[in-house]
Amino acid sequence: MLAQLSRVLRGNRELTTFLVCVLLSLVCLSLPPGAKGFVSTILSGAILGPIERASTAIVQRSRVREENAALRRIAIDLMIERAALVDYRHENERLRELMGFLVAFPKEELAEIVPARVIGMPGGRVVEGMKIDKGLRDSLVVGMPIVVPGGLVGKIASVGTNYSLVEPLTSASSGVSVITERGRVRGVVKPRFGAASRRVTWEIDYVQARSDIKEGDLVVTSGLGDVYPPGISVGRVVSAVEGPLTMSIEVELSVDFSKVEQVFVLTGRPGNPAEMDELREGLLRELDSERAALEGLP
Amino acid sequence: MRGAWFAGLAVLAVILDSAVAPEIEIGGARPDFLVLVIAYAGLVLGARPATILGFIVGLVVDSEQPEYLGLHALALSAVGFACAFAWEHLFRGSVFVQMSLLFGAALAHDLIFYVVYYRNHVDMFARFMGRFGLAGAAYTAALALLLYVLARALGWRSIVGGTRV
């Protein structure tokens, strides 16, 4: 029997090799745990260790790439959230400012105010015009003054069904009758275009020499001409230079026209207190929702 | 020379099994690159070298899990021998034969492995074979198709020669 098996195995080297391998495998499987550990330590230290290091390097590289991609996504999300946060903050500041303006306004005059949003602002270096989202439907008419909490913006130049075009103080054709709050000196504020129209300044014209005007004086509307109500802030005197007959007075406007988003139209209509209360409540609601949105952000 | 090539490929397969296979798994099924290499060693080198290669590489892989030292060695040497034996009796140039054989080899490898590993847990054995064994074997066999196309393009006659012994 053994001789026959030996003959078969000698004649079939492949089968012999396989059986030897199977036998060795079974021997390995039946080794005591200590011996298995010893053999494993030798094999893994000599052969498997370098292989594992290579595979770990590959895995880590791919993980690092995945982590990078994930971090990039997070960075983009955070940038978007930050942008939203900044928007909310600006909106919140603007609404607080408007709220303060409405609270400070006398109730009987507040009733004559129509709030509007700026929906267009053509012009390059200086703001030449503004488009607001209220028009004939809101009973606006040409000539109505436009103000913001900071001061005077301009007046309505033309009216459409649901929009109006505003002629701001910055427009080349504008001219506002003003008075200085301290010295009660009257004049007309107009833009002055410098060499090649590169620089624009606002000056008070028609002021006699030796008038009581100083740097820092507040300039407000005079109420003359029946266009603008008196007492609305226009700007501050930044320089006053004596001339032979008149003074050259430069004014810095109190409103930054490029940042105006919401304005108020002074309609001069008889007031509706209920409507104004509604406006106040609307603003408060908007403030509350802004605050809620801000709190909701991480 | 070809033996050294396959030894290098086996090392590469060990790396691929641990680093790449988890990344390309489909529904938990992973291809077994080591079975692929040992099976093709049987086709190209013959039964003896494939069996010895399967045994040595299996033993190295087993060193990671000393409790079952010899288990992969047993399974892979069986795969090497069985594949070489089967190639010699089949139309080895046929891609369908190669895929079927690869499927059988991967399945046999898992079968040997899980039988010993889960010898006391029949339910676990059945679940692993059903969940991973069959799908993994199919995945490995699918790689044989890619390998066949590559062998055809590169003119590896030992794989696409179409000889029947």
Image (spheres, helix red, strand yellow):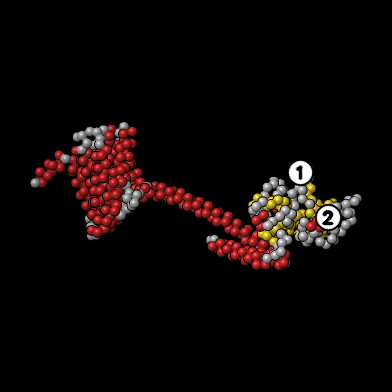
Which residue does the numbered mark 1 point to in the structure image? A197
At 70% from the left edge and 58% from the top edge, which residue is drawn? Answer: A265
Closest to the camera, between mark 2 and mark 1, is: 2
Left or right, A195 with respect to A160, comes to: right
Where residue A2 appears, x then y in whole percent? Answer: 10, 46
Residue A131 vertical position relative to residue B151 in the rendered view, above or below:
below
Under circle 2, the secondary element is: strand
Position in image of residue B162 (x %, y %): 24, 33
Amino acid type, mark 1 = Ser
The extreme left residue here reads: A1
**Is residue A276 visible in the rendered structure shown here?**
yes
Q: Using the image, tell me which numbered label, if any, was put on residue A187.
A: 2
Determine contact: label 2, label 1, CB under 8 Å: no
Which chain is home to disc 1?
Answer: A
| Residue A276 vertical position relative to residue B26 in the rendered view, above or below | below
Rendered image quadrant of residue B34: top left
Q: Looking at the image, which is closer to me, A25 or A146? A: A146
Residue B131 screen position, x and y as percent: 29, 53
Q: To which chain does the residue with label 2 belong?
A: A
- Front position in the image: A16 or A162: A162
Quadrant where the C terminus of chain B sits is top left
Q: Is residue A159 left or right of residue A82?
A: right
In which quarter of the view is residue B13 placed? top left
| Side of B8 relative to A74 (left or right) | left
Q: Amino acid at mark 2?
A: Gly
- Assess disc 1: are there few (<14), some (14-19) or many (≥20) residues with their C-alpha within 10 Å of its C-alpha: few
Q: Position of residue A227 (x, y in %)?
A: 77, 56
Which element carries disc 1, helix, strand or loop?
A: helix
Co-location on one chain, circles 2 and 1: yes
Residue A43 in view here:
no
User: Going 71% across and 64% down the picture, which residue do you hit?
Assistant: A270
In the depicted structure, whether residue A15 falls above or below residue A273: above
